[in-house]
Amino acid sequence: MFREIKRALKMHRIFIVQELKRFMEYKGDFITGAIGLLLAQLCSIIFISVIFSQIPTLVGWSFNEVMFIYGFSLIPKAVDHLFFDNLWAVGHFIVRKGDFDKYLTRPINPLFHVMAEKFQVDAFGELVMGIVLLSCSLPSLDIEYSFMKILLTIVVVIFASFIYTGIKIGTSAIAFWTKRSGNIIFMFYMVNDFVKYPIDIYNNVVRSVLTYIIPFAFTAYFPALYFITGENPLFNIGMTIVVAIVVMTIGVLIWNRGIKAYESAGS
Amino acid sequence: MIYVENLRKEFKKTIKEPGIKGSLKSFFKPKKEIIAAVKDISFEVNEGEILGFIGPNGAGKSTVIKMLTGILSPTSGSCSINGKNPQKDRKQYVKEIGVVFGQRTQLWWDLPLTETYTVLKEIYEVDDSRFKKRMEFLNEVLELEGFIKSPVRTLSLGQRMRADIAASLLHSPKVLFLDEPTIGLDVVVKDNIRKAIAKINAEENTTVILTTHDLEDIETLSKRIVMIDKGSKVFDGKIADLKEKYGQMRELAFVSSDENALDILSYAEKFGLEGDDLFAESDGASFKVRFNSSIVPVSDMLSYTLSKINVKDINVKDADIEEIIRRLYKEGVQNG
């Protein structure tokens, strides 16, 4: 077990180094991608600030609180995007074109291999934006700092990013049966746009979906709620971890069944 | 070494009627049909053997290879290679095999070729000294020096194929699966690749399973072939036996000063040959005739031709495996 984890980490490092070399080959393209993502977020933020110039609070949330939640939502998303972006390719073409064969003929776990193989430098656009938003909104929020809280933030970001990864694993694995699931991943993934804002601004149906069905609320709203109010850590933090484990488990189970149904493609 | 027993693979296929209406209909009410791509195939391969695995397009060759390499799970039947089951012991098993799909590549597309090898070294856990020796050997056999520092996307097809074969051999596999390794290559490159495969087989006693449409690959590399058609095995044996069994087609080529030599000769009427047993074509002063030598002996054909027309030059071609295969493909499963 220990040896396997050590080996996985080593392989992951090697794949990332490989990707950084690739990054150097196509610098311009990557930088454009990162700037694009940054601009996309910037547009939404300008939009929010326009709204807040008209109203003082949104269902009791101040501009800075909304910015904190928005910024927080970007970080786990960026982490997943940075490390595990290749799952999109599984849904779009790796399975359909039979390119998944390659992963099955190598002596490492195919899911790990396919996930670790890409390092999506574009995601730094989101990551930088998230960190900037958090640092700008923090001073005006009444938050007590402690070592414990910083540690908790790191832990919760890791688990929150697993919610993204788990959903992507499960939905991309559908391609093993349908040959193509890019749009299913897209449909699930885009739901995350809702959780950039406090979810109590939505009606009950949307809120329930975001909490129980596609639990993206745990990637931003709930953990951010804890950091803003300091209330209910057991639910806000604890459930984030539980939900991440559940989503990841379901994703991997679907994946493992999917691999058995893989039919490759003619050659 | 390799035992394949009653291997079978079925695919579910949705049948679509043509047109948008058909597509809509199949979307709401899909009609499924089960198609057996591989039907209960059995064969064995000995250690160090090069087996030619042939058959027409869509015969099920690739499906068999994919089951043997652990990519697909068989519907029924079993295969064991080195005592391992490709599906059950996948991780351990794939360390002992090398796989090349000629139509695909496992190289890192955007990076210099050496980068692929350094990553594969880690994936297969090849230690440094062994890796160095291995690269020297592969360099020598497949002549990689010229392009090892170039990005893979800039390689020619021939270079890429050599690089892919080297990639599959980096971890010194006991069995090498080559699915159409010479597809789309020119004659010189094909020849180099064949030599490399033969050398690796000779020096390391690597067992090779080779699928190809180029019968020269088979003739230069393997003594034994397994032929499949429509998912069933139609022949398993030595090439020499195949030639003896099916190889009665002979070809004679003549250069003659008579312009309408074929009309004068009218082979069909003279010998009563018809259908697949006779093929004649003329091209100005030269013409050739391909015929079944079990019906008409070569000597009869020769003496008859020489007696009828004025012959300047003669060329007798040996039973050519390509011709045999052509006939077998045509006859299809009726033999199996």
Image (tube, helix red, strand yellow):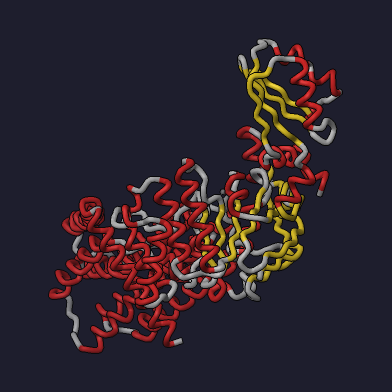
Of B305 and B113, nearer the camera is B305
Number of numbered markers: 0
Q: Is residue B46 left or right of residue A149?
A: right
Q: Splitting the image into 4 quarters, where does residue B65 fall?
A: bottom right
**Image quadrant containing the N terminus of chain B:** bottom right
Q: Is residue B225 visible?
A: yes
Could you tell me if residue B35 is visible in this image? no
Q: Nearer the viewer, residue B38 or B26?
A: B38
- Residue B32's place in the image compared with A210, above or below, is above
Q: Where in the figure is residue A229, as x and y percent of width and height? A: 26, 80
Q: Is residue A231 above or below residue B296?
A: below
Percent from the top left, x then y, of residue B45? 68, 64
Q: Position of residue A227 (x, y in %)?
A: 26, 79
At a point 66% along the width and 10% down the height, the residue shown is B259
Residue A264 is left or right of residue B193, and the answer is right
Q: Going by the image, does A56 lie left or right of B162?
A: left
Q: Position of residue A114 (x, y in %)?
A: 43, 65
Residue A45 or A245: which is nearer the viewer? A245
Residue A164 lies, with reference to residue B296, above or below; the image says below
Residue occupying image coordinates x 71% and y 23%: B280
At a point 70% along the width and 31% down the height, the residue shown is B251
Horizontally, is B266 left or right of A209 in the view? right
